[in-house]
Each structure stands twice: as structure tokens, then as C-alpha cells.
């Protein structure tokens, strides 16, 4: 039943990156097929592999899974990164919902015009420092534990680290004023599986560039301009 | 544990409606607090009950839950509407996420500028007929009454909600989908859902001008 675990997406972050992070954090190896041409995408469509005609798609345990949230929940549960009971799962889901919203502001960033990019950078930093980071800073401060939920490493920790690093790429000192998050970042980054993922040569993808944007637009035939 | 779940939101569908549907489908009674003024909203923020300064808020089992998906997953898990194992849960999650993408288009529709409304309506129709409904029509060809595992689940509730919401905009949208037509009738006749579909239930009507004004007033930036 187990067998290969294969990710189908562009060679870039997008909506697949959180999945790469979680698999890596769980110490799970995976293959990747990178979409570069329209033909590859149409082949997947015609083969009926994409339930809602969309990427990302992950082949695992005999399923062709789509919808990032569904994929991530499955991985989290399978590899014991989802808390010990319903209530811990609820907390993890809430926290991941927040970091998902935050990273959502960054998702469209590469596709914006230069002028909109500057505006969006300010929005990202403002949301991070006034809405999201304070919430997680408080969680960590209130319980004083190493991890966000249940004194145990979980999906919520992986997702928050990913979000922190992404926002730091937009403003390097964004964590000043958040001492708990600074300590959290150092702690989680030194967990062996994560440390490995953060090293060069891992399957972590770099900040999206123009080539990535071109590929996505070409494969998905996006002709219109994207606004934030 | 504590009393009934308590929902805090505007007096309308928005992002809370799937929560109302799921609680109702599970036969769970709940209370509602309706936001009518900016001051009420600001007080909630000041009191620190909104983790990300946003509603919906659902107080349930001693938790102040935000983030709609988290709330719905908790309710589904608690009331056995989440399948029997990890793989069934994965299917339910996939189906729910797809339906949510369609519902998102309907959610934002009332707030779109008048000149884009016709185009947006066309998009909703196109997505429903060409992307989402065909998937569930095909799933139901397995001949069972419910989408996943031959058992009533969150996915069924989400789908019936979506079907009815799309039909409000595009009345004949189910023509060409016989499985979905039968599904719609079956779900509508389930006792808890039937009750929710009757007048006087907590189900909210489609958004009107007054609702839109209230939302814009409360959440203006």
C-alpha cells in the first residue's frame, strides 16, 4: 500500500511548499515531478488525475490527493504531528489557519507588478507584525513550552516556522519585538529533520523568480494580470 | 461539557453558514450573538477573544475557536461526521475543500462591484457545471446514499448547502446531474436537515443590501 510518494507541481514554492516542509519535518522522503509544459498539465487532466483540474497533486498510499489542506491534514495525522486528541487538533487547525492566511498574502506576490509588490510588501509586514506574530508570541509566552500545542512537536510548529522565514525574506528584521518567536525560530530550525531541510541541496524551493512566474502562466494559460 | 455552542457573527450567512449547517445536521442546538455595530466588534478585539481579530467565533467546549475550517473539523470530529479512518477523512477533506472553493465565489459575489456581477455569475455557473458538480455526480455513481464510506458525513452537508446556494443563483443548474438531483432530495429529507430547511430555523437567508451594508460598516478598514 505504501510505495512511492510523488509530488506533482511546478518547480517552485506556490501551494506545494508547505507540503514539502511537512514531509521533510516528518522525515519522509518524496519524489517530485515538475510541470514545465502545457502538455504535461493536459496529460494529467486527461488522465483524470486531478480531481478538480487543479494542482498541487500528491500521489500517496494509493490515492491521488488534491487540495493542499486535505493533503497536509492527512500527512500530519499519518506521521503523528496532529496532537493527541480532538482538542489539540482543534488548536493546531486554528494556528495553521492563521499562518495559512499570512502566507496567503505572500503567495501572489511574485505575480504582481513592481508597483503592487511594494504595496503588498507593506501589507505583509503590517499583517505579520500587528495580527499574526502577536498571536503566536502570546501562545508561546502563556505556556512557556517549546512547541505551540501540547508540549509536542506538531504541524503547527512547522507551518509557523515556514511563515516566519517567508516574512523575513520580505523584511529581515521583522521578528524584532517578538522574543518568543525568535527563540522558537532557533529551536525549531535546529530540529534535525528541519535543519536538514534548511540546508542547500534539500528539496526546499527558493524564493519565486520571474522564470517561475512565466512557467506557471504558461502551463495554466493565465493571460490576465494578477492583482493583490 | 459546557452549555450550547455559541456563535458570534453578523446576522447573515457569510463564513458562519457552513457552521450552522453542520451543527444543525448533527442535531446540535446552538446560540447566536449577532454583530450589529463596529463598537461590538472592537470590544471583542479589545477583550482578546478573537485570536486573529476575525470572526467567525465559536465558543464550544471551553474553547474560543476561530478559523472556519478548524471549527468545522472539530465539529465533524466530535459528532462522528468525519469518516471512520484516515483515508475516509482524506476523501471528506478533499471534497469539502473543493466545495468550499465554489462557495467562496458565492460568498464574495454580493460584495463585487455591479459592473462585474454578471461576469462573476457566469464564473460561478461555469465552475459549478464544469468543475465541481461533475466530480460529485461521478462519485455518487457508486450507488450509495452518501459521498464517503456509505455513511452520512460533513462532505454530504457541505454539498447540499452548496447545491442549494448555487440553485438560488442559477435555478436549473442541476439539470444534467441526475445523481445530484436524487442526492439533494435524499439529504433534504434527513430529519435534522429537513428541520433546518424549515422557516424559523437558524438558517440565514441570502445576503441582501442591509446585510452587505452592515458587514461593510463593521469591518471597514
Image: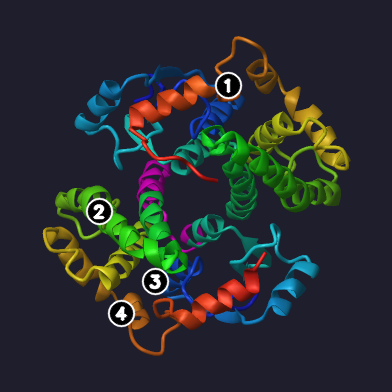
Q: Which residue is denoted by mark 1 in the rendering?
A: A27
Please determine whether, in this image, residue A218 is positioned above or below residue B2. above
Q: Which residue is denoted by mark 2 in the rendering?
A: B126
Q: Position of residue A63 (x, y in %)?
A: 33, 33
Horizontal relation, residue B59 to residue A110: left or right: right
* Label 2 close to label 1 by CB (< 8 Å): no
Q: Position of residue A98 (x, y in %)?
A: 63, 49
Question: Quarter-wise, where is residue A166 in the image?
Answer: top right
Q: Residue B25, labelled with which disc?
A: 3
Residue that appears at 83% across and 34% down? A182
Q: Position of residue B93 (x, y in %)?
A: 41, 48
Q: Residue B194, labelled with which disc?
A: 4
Q: Label 2, label 1: how many angstroms apart (C-alpha)?
A: 41 Å
Q: Which is more toward the observer, A116 or A2?
A: A116
Is disc 1 surrounded by few (<14), some (14 to 19) or many (20+) residues within 10 Å?
some
Residue that appears at 52% across and 23% down? A210
Co-location on one chain, circles 2 and 1: no
Residue that appears at 57% across and 43% down? A104
Q: Label 2, label 3: how many angstroms apart (C-alpha)?
A: 29 Å
Given the image, what chain letter belongs to the residue carrying mark 2? Answer: B
Given the image, what chain letter belongs to the residue carrying mark 3? Answer: B
Given the image, what chain letter belongs to the residue carrying mark 4? Answer: B
- Labels in figure, total: 4
Co-location on one chain, circles 1 and 3: no
Report the magenta residues as a range. B76-96
Pointer 3 or 4: first along the chain: 3
Amino acid at each position: 500500500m505504501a510505495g512511492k510518494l510523488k509530488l506533482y507541481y511546478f518547480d517552485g514554492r506556490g501551494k506545494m511548499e508547505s507540503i514539502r516542509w511537512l514531509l521533510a519535518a516528518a522525515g519522509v522522503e518524496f519524489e517530485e515531478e515538475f510541470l514545465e509544459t502545457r502538455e504535461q498539465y493536459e496529460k494529467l487532466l486527461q488522465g483524470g488525475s486531478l480531481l478538480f483540474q487543479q494542482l498541487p497533486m500528491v500521489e500517496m498510499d494509493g490515492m491521488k490527493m488534491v487540495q493542499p489542506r486535505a493533503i497536509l491534514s492527512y500527512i500530519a495525522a499519518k506521521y503523528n504531528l496532529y496532537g493527541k486528541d480532538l482538542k489539540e487538533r482543534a488548536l493546531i487547525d486554528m494556528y495553521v489557519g492563521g499562518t495559512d492566511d499570512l502566507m496567503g498574502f505572500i503567495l501572489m506576490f511574485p505575480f504582481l507588478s513592481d508597483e503592487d509588490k511594494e504595496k503588498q510588501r507593506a501589507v505583509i509586514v503590517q499583517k505579520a507584525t500587528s495580527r499574526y506574530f502577536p498571536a503566536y508570541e502570546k501562545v508561546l509566552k502563556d505556556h512557556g513550552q517549546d512547541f505551540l500545542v501540547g508540549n509536542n512537536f506538531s504541524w503547527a510548529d512547522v507551518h509557523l516556522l515556514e511563515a516566519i522565514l517567508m516574512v523575513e525574506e520580505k523584511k529581515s528584521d521583522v521578528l524584532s519585538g517578538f522574543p518568543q518567536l525568535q527563540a522558537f525560530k532557533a529551536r525549531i530550525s535546529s530540529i534535525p529533520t528541519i535543519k536538514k531541510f534548511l540546508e542547500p541541496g534539500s528539496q526546499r524551493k527558493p524564493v519565486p523568480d520571474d522564470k517561475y512566474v512565466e512557467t506557471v502562466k504558461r502551463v495554466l494559460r493565465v493571460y490576465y494580470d494578477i492583482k493583490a | 461539557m459546557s452549555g450550547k455552542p455559541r456563535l458570534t457573527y453578523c446576522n447573515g450567512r457569510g463564513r458562519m453558514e457552513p457552521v450552522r449547517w453542520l451543527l444543525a445536521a448533527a442535531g446540535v442546538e446552538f446560540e447566536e450573538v449577532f454583530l450589529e455595530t463596529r463598537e461590538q466588534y472592537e470590544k471583542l478585539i479589545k477583550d482578546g477573544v478573537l485570536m486573529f481579530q476575525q470572526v467567525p467565533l465559536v465558543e464550544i467546549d471551553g474553547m474560543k475557536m476561530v478559523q472556519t475550517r478548524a471549527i468545522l473539523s472539530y465539529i465533524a470530529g466530535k459528532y462522528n461526521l468525519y469518516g471512520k479512518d484516515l483515508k475516509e477523512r482524506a476523501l471528506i477533506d478533499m471534497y469539502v475543500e473543493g466545495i468550499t472553493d465554489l462557495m467562496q465565489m458565492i460568498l464574495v459575489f454580493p460584495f463585487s462591484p455591479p459592473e462585474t456581477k454578471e461576469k462573476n455569475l457566469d464564473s460561478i455557473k461555469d465552475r459549478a457545471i464544469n468543475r465541481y458538480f461533475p466530480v460529485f455526480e461521478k462519485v455518487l455513481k457508486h450507488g450509495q446514499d452518501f459521498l464517503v464510506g456509505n455513511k452520512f458525513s460533513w462532505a454530504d452537508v457541505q454539498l447540499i448547502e452548496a447545491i442549494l446556494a448555487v440553485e438560488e443563483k442559477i435555478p436549473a443548474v442541476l439539470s444534467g446531474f441526475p445523481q445530484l438531483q436524487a442526492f439533494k432530495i435524499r439529504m433534504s429529507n434527513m430529519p435534522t436537515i429537513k428541520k433546518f430547511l424549515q422557516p424559523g430555523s437558524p438558517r440565514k437567508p441570502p445576503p441582501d443590501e442591509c446585510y452587505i451594508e452592515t458587514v461593510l460598516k463593521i469591518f471597514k478598514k
